[in-house]
Amino acid sequence: MKIGIISDIHANLAALRAILEALDREQCVKIVCAGDVVGYGPSPCECAEIIRERRILCVRGNHDDMMLNDQRDYLMRPDVRAVIRWTRETVPHETREWLGNLPRTLRYAGFEVVHASHVFRPEWHYVMDGHSVMANFLFQDSALAFNGHTHLPLLALHQRGHTPKLIMLRRIVLPPGHRCLVNVGSVGQPRDRNPEAAAVIYETRDRSVMPVRAAYDIADTQKRMRQADLPENFINRLTEGR
């Protein structure tokens, strides 16, 4: 069966709708989310509502976690702190609790989903280079896992006795005898120089993964962000995919 995996929606309603339509056209029987439903974007309530209405399985991302945890606010850049505080004020308490209490990991159909990494100290560990890939595989027991967090579609591979590898994600049948970590990219704020919403389809029959992109109305999202008086740098980067 086909399973759609999304991540890092970041309150971008137009991007979420576009990628879900693309996954529906591909006849995915289930959709799973690797976290960060909110943050950066102008539509946190609407995005959370869609995830809940469609019963999309979801783990907690760092931005979701910050809905109930303000202890690290002082460590944030001022622009990030402004968006997080705006989101807390915009989202009703019940939805903030739901976001902040999402599980850190989940298992479904033989694979595992985490937001950032299997490394929990330091928290919200980025898997972006050889050292961070090796650290992840020290703790990843499952043969296959999906993540987000970096907003970059990447594939990490590890075969016993060999050095782990990190490559740009492409359509591929996952090799047997390897542990695999698939970063599905970002729905609402891609950073691979492609501004289209990103996701991945996993086909359980042959263990293949296929990146999916969907164009959406970026100008409308930017308009909504300006209406909410969100930081201009987060608005401009949407058109650049960075």
Image (cartoon, helix red, strand yellow):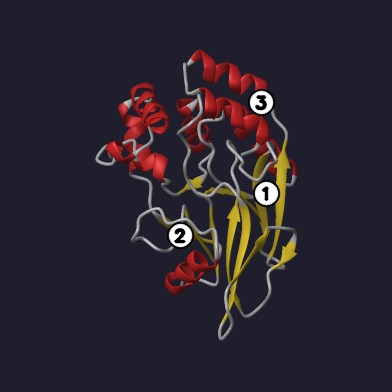
Q: Residue at x 61, y 76 (%)?
A: 178
Depth check: 97 or 182 in front?
182
Residue 87 occupies quadrant: top left
Q: Residue at x 68, y 69 (%)?
A: 174
Q: Residue at x 59, y 21 (%)?
A: 222
Q: Quadrant of the C terminus?
A: top right
Left or right: 167 with respect to 57?
right
Residue hosting label 2: 117
Q: Is residue 1 visible?
A: no
| Mark nearer the N terminus (3 vs 2) | 2
Question: Is tag 2's residue or tag 1's residue first in the polypeptide sequence?
Answer: 1
Q: Residues within 10 Å of mark 2 (few under 14, many from 20)?
A: many
Q: Quadrant of residue 80?
A: top left
**Distance from the alpha carbon under mark 3 to that under mark 2:** 29 Å
The residue under the point 47% across, 41% down is 36
The single residue placed furthest to the bottom in the displayed view is 161
Horizontal placement of 37 versus 186: left or right? left
Q: Quadrant of residue 83?
A: top left
Q: Find the residue positioned furthest to the left.
A: 71
Query: Is label 3 in contact with label 2 (beta carbons under 8 Å)?
Result: no
Say which residue label 3 marks.
218
Numbered label attached to residue 28: 1
Q: What secondary structure is found at the residue carrying circle 3?
A: helix
Measuring from the top left, give residue 237's x and y in whole percent. 60, 31
Query: Within 10 angstroms of label 3, few (less than 14), some, or many (20 or more) residues?
Result: some
The residue type indicated by label 3 comes to Ile
Amino acid at pointer 1:
Cys
Left or right side of 62 for 19: right
